[in-house]
Image: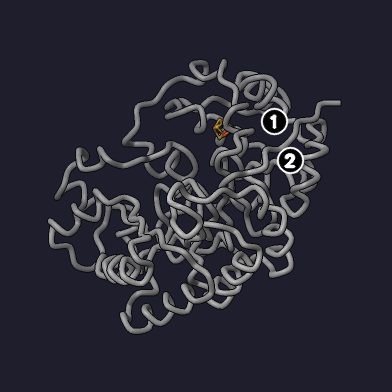
Amino acid sequence: MARVRAPKPVSCGILLSYKCTSTCRHCMYACSPTWRGDWISENDLEKILSQLSESVAPAPGGPSRVGINYGLHFTGGEPFLNYRLLLRAVELAEEHDIPSIFVETNCFWCASRDRAEEMLLELRNAGLDGMLVSVNPFLVEYTPFERMRVAAELSERIFSGNLMIYQPEFYEQFKKLGLRGTMKFEEYLERVGIGGLRWAELLPMGRACYRLRGIFRKYPARIFFDEDCRSSLLRSWHAHVDNYGNMITGYCAGLSLGDARRLDELVGEGVDLDERPILRMLIFEDLGSLYNFAVKEFGYMERSDGYVSKCDLCLDIRRHMAARAGACEYPELSPREFYMHLEEEPGFR
Ligand code: SF4
C-alpha cells in the first residue's frame, strides 16, 4: 500500500469560500462571483484551527507581527463578503493562541472609509494582527484603486505598521498613473506596457493558464514529462485549507491531499495514495506518467498550442479527467467545481 505522511504546516491560509467579487485572470484558485457560495462552517473552523495551533509558527518579528509566509491568514475568495464569519474566524484563531494572524483582501468593502475603519478596529480587537492588501493589474479591473488606498492607509495605522501590500510595485505604479476607479487589463497594457508586469510574481497556475496564456511562452508537453511534484505537494512551509476541508499544498488548487478536518490523522497515519492515484503519480512518478494515464484511460489529447508550465499541463489533464470521471472517483480532484471556473470570462459591472 502506498502511503505518504502529510506535512504539518508551519504557515497556513484558510479559504473561507471560493466566492469573490472578482474573476481575476491570474487567480490560482479560480475564484469568482459565480461559485455556489459555500462558506466554511464554524464547526469545521474549530476542528482545523485546533489542529493547526501547535504547528503554525510566528513571523520573525514575533507573534504579533505578520509575514506573507508566516502565521495564519484568512482568505478566499473574498473573506469580507462574509464579515460576520471572518470576525468569528479571527476570534477562534485568537482563542487557539495562533500567532501572526492576518486577512488577505481585494478591498471591495472599502467604499466608505468610516465603515472600513469600524470593521478593521473590530477585527483588531478580536485578535487580528495585520492585513494583506492585494494590488495588481488584474484586481484593479474590478476594485477601484481608491478602495485599496483606503484599506492600506487605515491598516497601516490601525495595525501599527503590520500592513503588507502585495505587490507594492503596483501600488506605486497606480499612484504614479494617478489612477482613479478601475482599469481594464487591456488599458493597463496600453498605458504601461507588458514591461510593467516585470515585478509580478505571476505563477503560471490556475486561471492564468487559460486567461493569460497569451503572455507566456509555450512548450510541448514532453518538455515537462520528467518533472515530479514531491517537493511541492509535501512541503510544510505553507499550505492552504479550503471551506470544504481540502488540504491544498504547493498552491495546487483543485488537488486535495486529504481532509484537513482530520489533519492529525493525515500527518500521523498518512494519506492512502492507492485511493488517490493522481497524487501517487505526481509524488512517486512524474508528469509523463499522469499524461500517459490520461491519454489511455480518458482520451486526453495534447494541446496543439503547447503549455506555459508544468502546472499548466498538470491542470489541463486534471480538468479533462474531472469532466469525465464519476463524482466519487479520484477524490483528490477536489473541489470539482474549481475545474468549471478556470476559463470563466470576467463579468464587469
Ligand atoms: S505540476 Fe501539478 S502537482 Fe505539480 S506543482 Fe504544478 S499543479 Fe502542483
Left or right relative to 26: residue 192: left
Residue 75 appears in the rendering: no
Q: Is residue 28 left or right of residue 329?
A: left
Q: Residue at x 78, y 32 (%)?
A: 273
Q: CA distance from mark 2 to mark 1?
A: 8 Å
Residue 69 x, y percent position in the rendering: 48, 46
Q: Which residue is mark 2?
A: 325
Q: Earlier in the sequence, mark 2 or mark 1?
A: 1
Locate the N terminus and report the quarter of the image it occupies: top right
Judge whether residue 270 can be spotted in this image.
Answer: yes
Q: Secondary structure at mark 2?
A: loop
Q: Residue at x 66, y 63 (%)?
A: 96
Up-down: is 250 above or below 281?
below
Q: What residue is pinned by disc 1?
A: 298
The residue positioned 25% from the left and 37% from the top of the image is: 198
Viewer-closest of 61 and 325: 61
Q: Position of residue 322 (x, y in %)?
A: 67, 42
Quarter of the rendered structure image containing ligand 1? top right
